[in-house]
Amino acid sequence: MENPLTSDARLLRHVPRLSPDGKTLALRINTPSELGGARLWLVDVARETFSRFTLEPTSGATWSPDGQTLFLGVAGADLVHHLYSQPVGAGGNLQQLTAGPYRSPTSIT
């Protein structure tokens, strides 16, 4: 599995967010091959493995209280950031939640 933090010119661009169970870290990483902004990655803390969570550039993320969903800011086709949710795990689809400008979620209750 790729580790995006060990390659040159890859930048951590977001305060990491630890899942409620303490097992997974969500963070934004810019990679040289991805233009347009940082993508969201998940890190399995125990195994120290990275997996890309979004293909779209994001402006940050916050875990749901149960740790099953991430809420994130994503630029839509109109280039305005909207609030989206995406279940964590296989088969989760990105779902737009707002129609107006929204940057980065800081908490979800």
Image: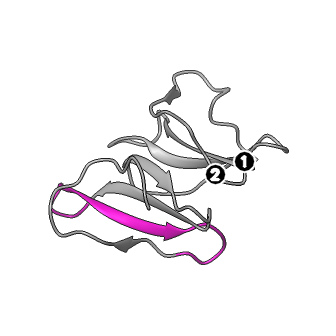
Q: Which mark is residue 22?
A: 1
- The residue positioned farthest toward the top in the image shown: 8
Say if mark 1 contacts mark 2, CB within 8 Å: yes
Question: In the depicted view, which residue is nearer to us: 10 or 47?
Answer: 47
- In which quadrant is the C terminus drawn? bottom left
What is the count of numbered marks?
Answer: 2
Q: Which mark is residue 19?
A: 2
Q: Amino acid at mark 2?
A: Ser
Question: In the depicted view, which residue is nearer to us: 4 or 99?
Answer: 99
Q: Give the magenta-colored segment's residue range.
A: 76-92
Question: Mark 1 and mark 2: span between their CA atoms?
Answer: 5 Å
In this view, 29 is above or below 67: above
Residue occupying image coordinates x 52% and y 62% = 64
Q: Secondary structure at mark 1?
A: loop
Q: Residues within 10 Å of mark 1 (few under 14, many from 20)?
A: few
Rendered location of residue 15, percent (x, y) = 49, 33
Residue occupying image coordinates x 75% and y 50% = 23
- The residue positioned farthest toward the right in the image shown: 47
Residue occupying image coordinates x 36% and y 51% = 105
